[in-house]
Image (cartoon, rainbow, N blue to C red):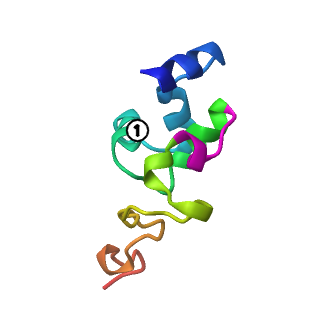
Amino acid sequence: MWICGQLRIRGTSLRALALRAGVTHQAMSAALMAPNIHLEPAIAEAIGLTPQTLFPERFGAGGVRLTRTRTIQRSTQPRCDKVESAGGR
């Protein structure tokens, strides 16, 4: 794939981008096939392009996103309802 070749020329890979972005390499690979508003910029930046240039089929005139994307599913906040008090009962 052209994108992987461009990354290789620049001394990086999808796996390295995934590591920097804190996602699995499968998630980064999936962003090549399906819209991902969070990972597209990381891939494009690594190649020296904008997401609109790299994935033109996902954007319309003026850079407006055409495709729907999934919302982020993970939470960065711990779930307090699952934590027991250490001080006693």
Q: Which amino acid type is marked by label 1? A: Leu
Q: Which residue is found at the position 59% from the left and 43% from the top? A: 53
Question: Was residue 52 drawn as part of the magenta stretch in this picture?
Answer: yes
Of all residues, the one furthest to the front in this rendering is 61
Position of 29 with respect to 77 (left or right) is left
- Mark 1 crowdedness (10 Å alpha carbons): few <14, some 14-19, many ≥20: some
- Residue appearing at x 36%, y 81% in the figure: 88
In percent of width and height, residue 5 lies at 52, 16
Please name whichever residue, 62 or 47, is drawn nearer the observer in this view of the structure: 62
Residue at left 49%, top 44%?
55
Q: Quadrant of the N terminus?
A: top left
Quarter the C terminus occupies: bottom left
Tell me if 62 is positioned left or right of 76 in this view. Answer: right
Vertical order, 21 against 48 (above or below): below
**Residue situated furthest right in the rendering:** 48
- Is 18 rendered above or below residue 57? above
Between 28 and 55, the one nearer to me in the picture: 55
Q: Secondary structure at mark 1?
A: helix
Residue 48 sits in quarter: top right
Q: Position of residue 49 (x, y in %)?
A: 66, 38
Q: Which residue is mark 1?
A: 32
Residue range in magenta is 48-54
Query: Who is closer to the viewer here, 50 or 56?
Result: 56
Q: Is residue 15 above or below residue 33?
A: above
Residue 12 among those drawn in magenta: no
Query: Percent from the top left, x then y, of residue 26?
Result: 34, 36
